[in-house]
């Protein structure tokens, strides 16, 4: 494994509208030593405008991984941090970018880490935000907090570089952590059990999904722990179905 924690951090751009913003983001990343770029359903890519604005970071564009969904882009990550200036009534645990960068660098001891940015006009949807473990804010001027996409990427990449330079990466401990795909599997199993048992009324789900995502994300479970919970849910569902059919 590469000793540089920045090599295990990816910038994920979701539904980017303007190709020039992809190029500018790549330039911002490379200047800070962050080189993994993932694009989720970009409107136009590859694109000459992206190449022009990359200005020396063409290699990041050539190596960019284009995927069809956010879930695909972060599935193998052990942590995902969502950037959004818009406060949400319900969402993941909130943190400022400097704190999130420090935590993200530390989590690279366990695997890949993602920092996720939304569309220029609408940002991340509530569902995309909930797919991540933390909601990250850049503490801009509250009277004028508008940053363009590349500016936001530059700030995050800078904070990641400072975090990587300012603290030693702790050794990996314990069993492998759950990936984002592992967590999505657990959430699906919880959904199934809650619906089958009648605990969840699909007509009035309330904030149940958001609440257990927040709870489990804060716990940062290991993969084996997630598998134990999923096994328990499968056993309970089997017992319930056997009883219902007898």
Image: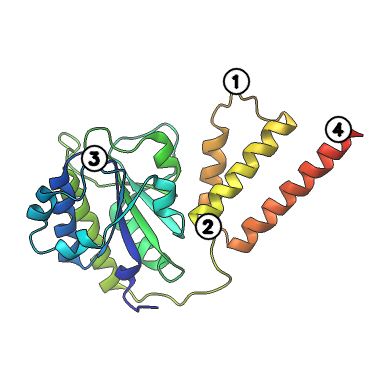
Quadrant in the rendering for residue 64: bottom left
Q: Which percent across, then down, holds residue 213?
A: 53, 43
Pointer 4 local density, CA inside 10 Å: few below 14, some 14–19, many at least 20: few
Residue 152 x %, y %:
20, 49
Pointer 4: what residue? 244
Residue beneath the point at 24% across and 42% down? 16
Q: Which dot, 3 or 4, sits closer to the camera?
A: 3
Q: Nearer the viewer, mark 2 or mark 4?
A: 4
In percent of width and height, residue 201 lies at 65, 24
Q: Callout 3 environment at 10 Å: few (<14), some (14 to 19), or many (20+)?
A: some
Quadrant showing the C terminus: top right
Q: Is residue 148 left or right of residue 65?
A: left
Crowdedness near tag 1: few (<14), some (14–19) or many (≥20) residues, C-alpha within 10 Å: few
Mark-to-mark CA distance, 2 and 1: 30 Å
Q: Are marks 2 and 3 in contact (CB under 8 Å)?
A: no
Q: Quadrant of residue 128?
A: top left
Return the mark for residue 43: 3
- Compared to residue 164, the image places residue 144 above or below, namely above
First in sequence: mark 2 vs mark 4: 2
Label 3 or label 1, whichever comes before in sequence order: 3
The numbered mark at residue 203 is 1
| Callout 2 secondary element | loop
Q: Where does residue 186 sit, x and y in percent of width and height?
A: 60, 48
Q: Earlier in the sequence, mark 2 or mark 1?
A: 1
């Amino acid at each position: 494994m590469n000793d540089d924690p920045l090599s295990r951090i990816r910038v994920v751009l979701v539904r980017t509208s303007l190709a020039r913003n992809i190029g500018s983001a790549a330039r911002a990343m490379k200047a800070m030593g962050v080189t993994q770029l993932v694009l989720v359903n970009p409107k136009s890519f590859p694109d000459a405008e992206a190449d022009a604005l990359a200005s020396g970071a063409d290699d990041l564009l050539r190596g960019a991984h284009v995927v069809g969904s956010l879930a695909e882009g972060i599935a193998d990550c052990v942590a995902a941090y969502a950037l959004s200036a818009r406060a949400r009534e319900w969402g993941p645990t909130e943190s400022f970018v400097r704190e999130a960068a420090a935590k993200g660098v530390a989590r690279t001891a366990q695997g890949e880490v993602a920092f996720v940015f939304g569309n220029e006009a609408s940002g991340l949807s509530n569902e995309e935000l909930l797919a991540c473990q933390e909601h990250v804010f850049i503490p801009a001027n509250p009277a004028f907090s508008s940053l363009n996409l590349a500016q936001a990427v530059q700030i995050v990449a800078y904070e990641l570089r400072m975090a990587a330079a300012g603290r030693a990466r702790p050794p990996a401990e314990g069993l492998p952590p759950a990936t984002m795909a592992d967590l999505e599997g657990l959430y699906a199993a919880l959904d199934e059990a809650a619906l089958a048992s009648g605990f969840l009324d699909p007509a009035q789900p309330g904030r149940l999904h958001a609440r257990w995502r927040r709870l489990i994300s804060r716990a940062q479970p290991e993969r084996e722990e997630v598998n134990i919970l999923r096994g328990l849910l499968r056993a309970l569902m089997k017992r319930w179905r056997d009883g219902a059919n007898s």
